[in-house]
Amino acid sequence: MRIMPRKSRLNLVPVNLGDETLGQRLARACKARGLSQTELAEKIGSIQALVSDYERGNLRLSAEMTIRFAEALGMSTDELLGVKPGKTADEMSLSLTRRLKGIETLPAAQQKALLQTIDAFLKSTG
């Protein structure tokens, strides 16, 4: 005999998480940080196929995986879940914005060299 779950009698107000799905937010956050699915998978101790499944909505994030993704992406779980908006480029610190503008004024070869140095530094600390 198959038992059907009872319909909830709770009248919960729907939570507005915006138009973006969790998977879309995850993919956008990855792209914004210049991370591939493989790189993100390495950071969370997983494999690329699972990151892809989360981004496409084929898997639901557990609490533990939500925390792992948020930490790897340098964001809060609220930002990842869409409860609280994340920082936009407009909200970046003024000193960081000034530095980025300074980098943009450099010749292409110097920009490339500087960005490679920054990438190497970030990789060594991550």
Image (spheres, grey):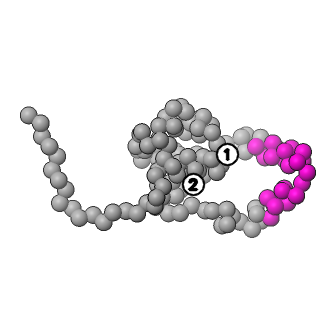
Q: Which region shows up in magenta?
A: 98-119
Residue 84 at x, y percent in the picture: 50, 63
Instruction: Identify residue type, mark 1.
Output: Gly
Q: Residue at x 77, y 40 (%)?
A: 120
Residue 96 at x, y percent in the picture: 76, 62
Q: Residue at x 88, y 48 (%)?
A: 108
Instruction: Say the numbered circle drawn on residue 75.
Output: 2
Front position in the image: 60 or 44: 60
Main SS of residues in magenta? helix
Instruction: Identify residue type, mark 2.
Output: Met
Front position in the image: 19 or 97: 19
Task: Point out the tag, 2 or 1, that comes first from the N-terminus.
Answer: 1
Q: Is residue 111 left or right of residue 54?
A: right
State the SS at label 2.
loop
Task: Specify the quadrant of the image occupied by residue 121.
Answer: top right
Residue hosting label 1: 34
Quarter holding the N terminus is top left
Foreground: disc 2 or disc 1: 1
Residue 61 at x, y percent in the picture: 43, 44
Residue 45 appearing in the image: no
Q: Looking at this rendering, what residue extends furthest in the front direction?
A: 19
Q: Is residue 38 left or right of residue 19?
A: right
Q: Residue at x 58, y 50 (%)?
A: 28
Q: Is 113 included in the stretch rendered in magenta?
A: yes
Few, some or many residues within 10 Å of mark 1 (<14, 14–19, 20+): few
